[in-house]
Image (cartoon, grey):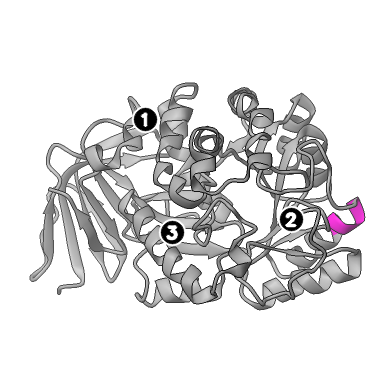
Amino acid sequence: MTDTLLVRGGDVLDPVAGDYLAGHDVLARDGRVVDLGRDLAAPDGARVLDATGLRVLPGLVDCHVHVTAATADLSALPSWAPSYVSAHAGRLMQDMLHRGFTTVRDTGGADFGLARAQAEGLITGPRLAFGGKALSQTGGHGDVRGPGTDAQEEPGCCASMGRVVDGVEALRVAARDELRKGAHHLKVMAGGGVSSPTDRIDSTQYSLDELRAVVAEAEAANRYVAAHAYTARAIDRALESGVRTIEHGNLLDAHSVELFLAHDAFLVPTLVTYWALKVEGRDFGLPQDSWEKVDAVLEAGIGALQLAAAAGVKIAYGSDLLGGMQRHQSQEFRIRAEVLPSADVLRSATTVAAELLGMVGEVGVLTPGAHADLLLVDGDPLQDAGILAEPGKHVPVVVQAGRVVLDRR
């Protein structure tokens, strides 16, 4: 029974209740949790992992990553060989897993090949929900051409994170194409961004008819749409068009919050990326023009998080880091824990993330039937979720699908 694991005697986090089940065992078989309780009998041949004195958390979920973003200079990626980008992605994904992120959602760049490689064990990394290439209007956040460049890549030719598409009918075709290739969601650029060379942060992107067309295609396939948006105007247009998740949302306002609640939508803040871009962005390839945009969203993010949380908006965990800055992925816990209750911060990376992904009961919890993804944690993240910002110090063991993938002890 080498496929059986018993985690013995830890304090198991119940993220819904915001409390621990003290001194409980977790029994996993064939990658799934099969039992949870005290003094469970160890099946013959089972591996027993002693968790005495430690907290046992469900595997963490990051809802906004870019596993192919091996550089912050996104305009350079299309010139890289896809095989070279995939090699970088494998390393970045392994690092994510070793930080305790056992499931991630890629919001631009990853495809069915990486997801399949992870599922088949060819890549060691988090379970991967992907959206394929993000959809961008000409001159939008996903258009990486500088003002002096006219040539445009053919869809599917290169390792870029987005594709430029204009017009309702063309967007329908592009959306269907990404769904054909297995996308779990569609991503649209609904407003300006930091890393794009020719747009303004305060711009809105895509007409309402275009946004609604993408939403309609996603809903027809029983999928959903995520939208990159910073300003209240961009956020409101996206939510009113039926978008389900807003990525970033740093400049939202009270009316935006009302729309989140009315549409039962999710907010995915990515506060750590602005801190990292400001401090290190240029060292990892972020162009000067993009670096100068960071201040427009850096300071507002915390206030937006607090406003949304106070109103009861569903908030999921996101990081959105690029290149070598991805090593800061866990620092989002520290930033949020300074202004939000630690239990809510933990829910953002467990149960709320599971709901966003449509994986309630499968990830983010340790109950029978869930994937046997778990962390052993030295310390109490319910008192201070910020300790998860130092996985090398506080997360000695990572288990994914019932298999110990990292043991630092």
Residue beneath disc 2: 188
Q: Which residue is mark 1?
A: 386
Asked if disc 3 and disc 1 are in contact, CB closer than 8 Å, the reply is no
Q: Report the residue at 37% width, 71% height from top.
A: 123
Q: Nearer the viewer, mark 3 or mark 1?
A: 1
For mark 3, give the secondary structure.
loop
Image quadrant assignment for residue 328: top left
Q: Is residue 180 above or below residue 382?
A: below
| Label 1 – label 2 distance at C-alpha | 31 Å
- Secondary element at image label 2: strand
Residue tagged 3: 362
For the residue carrying disc 3, how many other residues have a C-alpha within 10 Å: few (<14), some (14-19), or many (20+)? many
Q: Nearer the viewer, residue 197 or 400?
A: 197
- Residue flagged by tag 2: what amino acid is it? Val
- Badge number at residue 83: none
Callout 1: SS: helix
> Disc 2 to disc 3, how far (Cα)?
27 Å
Q: What are the residue bounds of the magenta stretch?
A: 208-212
Three-letter amino acid code at the position of disc 3: Glu
